[in-house]
Image: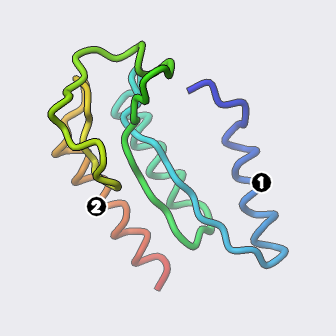
């Protein structure tokens, strides 16, 4: 996704904020074109390793004019683009939505159990 921050920088930032008493939430994008099942599973593990107060997962959202919009094919205009927190691809994806929804639910459940 061409982010300039590394995972290690993110990890350090979370720990730094927690040390000074600031609660931290994280928003993760999974299923980006070019990702693999393995890299998505790495993202879930990373999220569960961090001392976060809240986590959220979503799939990439190709806004018109963005590089992602130009990169993906077969955008489905019939999908409801206004529904937030849906794990629904609005374009043709190599990832199975049912699998991704299940893995996100499982990861959120594991996060909830860890917080108890």
> Does 4 sit above or below residue 22?
above
Name the foreground residue: 91 vs 108.
91
Give me the C-alpha separation between circle 2 and circle 1: 26 Å
At label 1, counting other C-alpha atoms closer than 10 Å, the crowd grade (few under 14, some 14-19, many 20 or more) is few
Return the residue at label 1.
12
Q: In this rendering, is residue 113 above or below 101?
A: below
Percent coordinates x, y for residue 42 in the rendering:
47, 42
Q: Quadrant of the N terminus?
A: top right
Classify residue 6 as left or right of residue 115. right
Q: Which residue is drawn at 46% across and 86% down?
A: 116
Mark linked to residue 105: 2
Q: Which of marks 2 and 1 is nearer the N terminus?
A: 1
Q: Residue at x 50, y 61 (%)?
A: 48
Describe residue 72's horizontal placement relative to residue 26 as left or right: left
Q: Write the residue at 79% across / 79% down.
A: 21
Foreground pick, 66 / 32: 66
The percent coordinates of residue 43 (x first, y second) are 48, 45
Q: Eyeballing the image, is 101 above or below 33?
A: below
Quadrant in the picture for residue 24: bottom right
Q: Identify which residue, 53 or 75, lies in the foreground.
A: 75
Kind of element beneath mark 2: helix
Identify which residue is drawn at 54% across, 51% down. 46
- Of all residues, the one furthest to the bottom in this rendering is 116
Instruction: Look at the numbered disc 1 and give the secondary structure of its residue.
Output: helix
Task: Give residue 49's position: percent from left, percent from top.
Answer: 56, 60
Q: In which quarter of the image is residue 90?
A: top left
Q: How many labels does the image show?
A: 2
- Give how far across and how far down residue 71 sits, in percent: 41, 14
Label 2 environment density (alpha carbons within 10 Å; few <14, some 14–19, many ≥20)? few
Applied colour scheme? rainbow
The vertical placement of 35 against 53, above or below, is above
């Amino acid at each position: 996704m061409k982010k300039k921050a590394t995972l290690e920088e993110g990890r350090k930032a979370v720990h730094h904020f927690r040390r000074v008493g600031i609660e931290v939430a994280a928003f993760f994008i999974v299923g980006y074109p070019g990702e693999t099942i393995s890299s998505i599973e790495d993202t879930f593990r990373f999220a569960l390793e961090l001392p976060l107060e809240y986590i959220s997962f979503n799939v990439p959202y190709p806004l018109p004019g963005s590089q992602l919009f130009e990169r993906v094919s077969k955008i489905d205009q019939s999908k409801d683009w206004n529904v937030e927190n849906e794990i629904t691809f609005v374009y043709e994806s190599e990832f199975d939505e049912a699998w991704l929804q299940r893995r996100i639910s499982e990861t959120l459940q594991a996060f909830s159990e860890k917080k108890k």
